[in-house]
Image: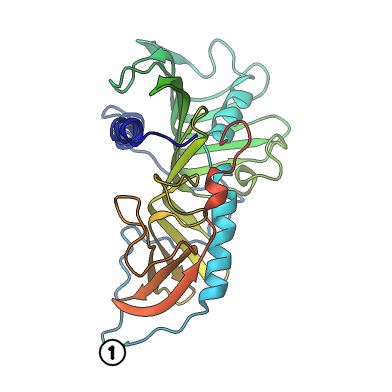
Amino acid sequence: MIVPNMYLEDILRRTLPLILLSFAAFACDSDAPDQQTDAPDGITEDVDMPTAYEYTPDEDQVSAEIDLDAAGAAIQGVLSNIHAYNAMPVLESYDHFMGAADDQCPLYYEQNGNAFWYSDCVSDEGMMYSGYAFYNLYEQENLFGDGNLWDAVSLSGTADMESGQGARFHLGGQAYSAWTSGNDGGSDFTVYQSSISGTFFDDSGERSGDWMSTGQTPTVSMFAAEYTDYGLRYMLVDGDAVLKGDVTAVSFENLLMYTYAPGFYPCREEPAGALSFRDAEGRWFEVTFDIDDNREVMPGGECDGCGMATHHGEVIGQLCIDASPLVSWEGTPW
């Protein structure tokens, strides 16, 4: 069934702005100490991610040669696995290590349902807690003023936990997950949000094989929704991923993908929005796709998954990806 445009236009108009509101609401706390994102001992941070992409091109540099097929393959690898970079591994690791806490270690402070601890102690079960953390749990609350009742978990702080057996968890930043469901325009819907920013590490074996076990420093925000009666999904990705190889970083700039729906979204594999990537020489390349703000293919464009790659305003060529994995989840997106 194709989604009636009058419903979806209203749905998107009301739900997409929640992304920015929610990121700000969960990421900021004016009373919190300054957060640090240092990796724990034993984790090597060999990444030099610029803060505002302050790469200054050589004025004499006119062209930039790069293997766009190889770059596309590297970016495809990130897209195909981006769902894994959600907040739940961080939240689950925190819950696991806090299971060894006692009444005095760490010492909790609670106010209006929000919990905070600041400690340097060892619990009765031999778990060492050092640093501070804010933990907030919301159940069926109208968090964003949209009329929907949201469940959410938010965690932020700088803390290290270590068991007597040497298992460690490091929290150095912010993570939150939120979800809601309801009915709009005649369709049941579920909306999911996730944001992580900082350095996180868990070597307890509980997270073996996922990104938490390697001490990565991701900055990824995702917003996903499914309208079951319409057969529609969409997902927005914003943030940075660090890689190794010829492509060392990729930045998603409100990259938005829908399921294919004639009359609403025209492409099966090409997203709207843009992305940038950095090569091993520190040069940044920008890629823009052929879908405009009205979800229509621009004149001369094609639904081929390929975008125009430029460097310092100069067209380099086409870079091709398949963004359909963004909306190809089973059950829930993460």
Image quadrant of residue 141?
top left
Q: Is residue 118 visible?
A: no
Q: Secondary structure at mark 1?
A: loop
Q: Measured along the vertical axis of the image, is residue 67 above or below residue 142?
A: below
Q: Quadrant of the C terminus?
A: top right
Q: Give coordinates of residue 119: x percent, y percent.
A: 47, 24
Q: Is residue 187 left or right of residue 330?
A: left
Task: Using the image as rendered, state which of residue 115 and residue 55 is in the foreground.
Answer: 55
**Label 1 crowding class (10 Å Cα cut-off): few <14, some 14-19, many 20+?**
few
Q: Measured along the vertical axis of the image, is residue 1 above or below residue 310?
A: above
Task: Using the image as rendered, state which of residue 89 and residue 44 is in the foreground.
Answer: 89
Task: Using the image as rendered, state which of residue 23 and residue 318 is in the foreground.
Answer: 318
Q: Is residue 123 visible?
A: yes
- The residue lying at 49 percent from left, 47 percent from top is 260
Q: Is residue 37 left or right of residue 161?
A: left
Q: Give coordinates of residue 167: x percent, y percent.
A: 68, 35
Can you identify the residue that label 1 sits on?
60
Identify the coloring.
rainbow
Q: Measured along the vertical axis of the image, is residue 171 above or below residue 117?
A: below
Image quadrant of residue 93?
top right
Image quadrant of residue 127?
top right
Q: Give coordinates of residue 206: x percent, y percent.
A: 70, 34
- The residue lying at 40 percent from left, 74 percent from top is 283
Identify the amino acid type marked 1: Asp
- The residue lying at 32 percent from left, 32 percent from top is 18
Task: Using the image as rendered, state which of residue 63 and residue 288 is in the foreground.
Answer: 288
Q: Give coordinates of residue 88: x percent, y percent.
A: 56, 32
Q: Is residue 205 left or right of residue 31?
A: right
Q: Is residue 123 left or right of residue 198?
A: right
